[in-house]
Image (cartoon, rainbow, N blue to C red):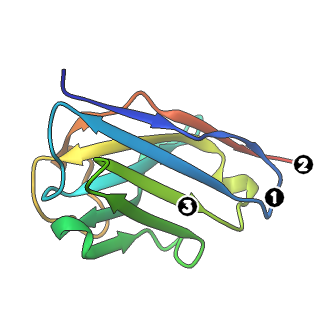
Amino acid sequence: EVQLVESGGGLVQPGGSLRLSCAASGFTFASNCMGWFRQAPGKEREGVAGIYFGGTSITYADSVKGRFTISQDNAKNTVYLQMDSLKPEDTAMYYCAASRYLYCYTPLVLTDFNLWGQGTQVTVSS
């Protein structure tokens, strides 16, 4: 079965860190654009970070630059999102997604992604 499974979400205080993982099964993503998106209640889903060309190229949304780091482990077929200096406005459901294309556009184009995980909740609150 082709699927993406996210993990690592939770409740963290402002200024804290979390690392999200996205494990892919049923396909090898090493060459495709892989992205992390988030959606807060009442807001549209937005792209956070993308990684492509086997992990050699990366793109970030301006809102997370310098705080979030996307990476991938091709041997484990897993993509990660390290989130540091978290803010309350980072609170959202975070989704991992696989694009049908090799290239990640900046900003990420929602309709480029045709495989989605179930999401993992991140809550930043004191």
Q: CA distance from mark 2 to mark 1?
A: 7 Å
Residue at 66% in and 46% down: 91
Say which quarter of the image contains residue 17. Answer: bottom right
Q: Earlier in the sequence, mark 3 or mark 2?
A: 3
Mark linked to residue 14: 1
Q: Secondary structure at mark 3?
A: strand
Q: Check whether the beta carbons of the residues at disc 1 and disc 3 lie within 8 A of each other.
A: no
Residue at the location (29% across, 60% down)?
108
User: Quick one: label 2 or label 1, which is nearer the N terminus?
Assistant: 1
Q: At label 3, which amino acid type do we have? A: Gln
* Secondary element at tag 2: loop
* Earlier residue among tags 1 and 3: 1
**In the rendering, at what x and y percent does residue 76 appear?**
32, 48
For image coordinates 61% across by 40% down, the residue present is 9
SS of the residue under disc 1:
loop
Q: Kindly identify which numbered label has been placed on residue 126.
A: 2
* As drawn, 5 above or below 35: above
Task: Look at label 2 and name its amino acid.
Answer: Ser
User: Looking at the rendered structure, which numbered label has been put on residue 47?
Assistant: none
For disc 1, the neighbor class at 10 Å (few under 14, some 14 to 19, many from 20) is some
Disc 1 versus disc 3: distance between alpha carbons? Answer: 15 Å
Q: Report the Cα–Cα distance between label 3 and label 2.
A: 20 Å
- Residue under numbered circle 3: 82
- The percent position of residue 56, horizontal first and vertical second, equals 24, 76
Task: Depth check: give the residue in front, 63 or 80.
Answer: 80
Q: Is 79 on the left or on the right of 123, as rendered?
A: left
The crowding category of the residue bearing disc 3, from other C-alpha atoms within 10 Å (few below 14, some 14 to 19, many at least 20), is some
Mark nearer the viewer, 3 or 2: 3
Q: Return the residue nearer the eye: 121 or 78.
A: 78
CB-based contact (under 8 Å), mark 2 and mark 1: yes
Badge count? 3
